[in-house]
Image: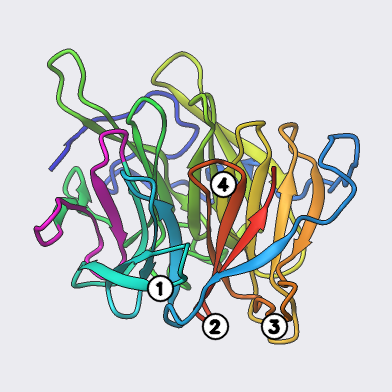
Amino acid sequence: HARSQESGDTGGPPASRHARPPSRHGKRLSDTIMAYTQINVESSFDVGSAMPSVFVAASGLGEAVCSPFIDGTGGLNVVDSSTGDVIAVDLSSGQSSVVMNSGGAPSGAAVNPDGDMFIADIGHAAVMTASEGLSPSVYCDKYEDHSFKGPNTVAFDVNGTMFFTDSGPLGETGIEAPTGSVYAITAPSNGQRETLKPLASQCLAHPCGVAAAPDGTFVYVCEMMQNRILRFFQRPTGVFHCSVFAQLSGGVGPSAVAVAPDGRLFVTVFDVDPSAAGRVVVVSPEGKVIQEITVAAADGTSASSELTGITLSSDKGKVYVTDGNSGVLFGISIA
């Protein structure tokens, strides 16, 4: 297991679960962060006047498909949380094939700069690692002596630092029990082992999607049950702070986020209303909602409101979105 270490001033409660809980008069991170921020929809950021083109990239991927990601070869993959499969998608043909099975309930996956795959698996309550040709194995399943609730999503920055959210299954860490966390595992360097530390410990309402800015300056986290995007930054290096970056409205909340090279955030919104359309919200680098994209292809195929993942294409000119209800992978041109 990665060696654990107390972080600096994370803005959250003590990392150890044996620490004294906040008093009735104390406040958790989720209480002290402003809960409601006025949404300011602007068009000053140049995103073009036309609605982006939406198309079906693949279908029949399973009704629990989520977390599209680009592998070490530039290929697109998704995971199926009901079967445990990691699935490669051939975008030229729309065909798919199973790469491996986690043996659990994966809800997120990503590769590090070296091309090694890591899987956030709620079933195993662990982050798994998977080498080519081998079965996935547990990479990290606890902080200090406390087991994770169930890692939800994993991402890497340009330096190889891993970020992952620990939410457990939907309902375990909601507004009534904001005990979800965000962790980082620093990449080994100068002979040092990787280090696990909490960025926000047991204080969030179902943290799920996570993504790092292209230059590694910021890390963005979807806090679904508060319907908002959080932004983490370091000052000084190694000491993380957090604030609300964008407060959304409507639906249940954001499920996943991808950061474009120009700093725009593309955020999938999850909802349980069967009459609601699938939506991707575009947020400017300043945190303003600047566009809402209805995920409906020209052939008449529309996404349900249960959007479960998003990733940038290898050429950064598109995003791919998974619909966890229909098993369809949609593409959206953003260049």
Mark 4 = which residue?
A: 258
Q: Is residue 308 visible?
A: yes
Q: Which residue is rendered at x = 65% and y = 43% of the image?
A: 265
Q: Which residue ends up furthest to the left in the rendered image?
A: 134
Q: Position of residue 12 (x, y in %)?
A: 47, 38
Q: Position of residue 310 (x, y in %)?
A: 54, 57
Mark 1 = which residue?
A: 95
Question: Dot 4: few (<14), some (14–19), or many (≥20) neighbours within 10 Å?
Answer: many
Report the mark closest to the observer, 2 or 1: 1
Classify residue 329 as left or right of residue 294.
Answer: left
Between 8 and 184, the residue placed more toward the observer is: 184
Task: Compare marks 2 and 1 and give the one earlier in the sequence.
Answer: 1
Mark 3 = which residue?
A: 273
Report the mark closest to the observer, 3 or 2: 2
Q: Tell me where the magenta segment starts and ends, as one range.
A: 112-136
Task: Compare marks 1 and 3 and give the one earlier in the sequence.
Answer: 1
Q: Main secondary structure of the magenta part?
A: loop
Question: Dot 2: few (<14), some (14–19), or many (≥20) neighbours within 10 Å?
Answer: some
Q: Which residue is rendered at x = 51% and y = 24% of the image?
A: 215
Mark 3 and mark 2: span between their CA atoms?
Answer: 14 Å
Task: Compare marks 1 and 4 and give the one earlier in the sequence.
Answer: 1
Q: SS for tag 4?
A: strand
Q: Is residue 97 magenta?
A: no
Classify residue 307 as left or right of residue 181.
Answer: right
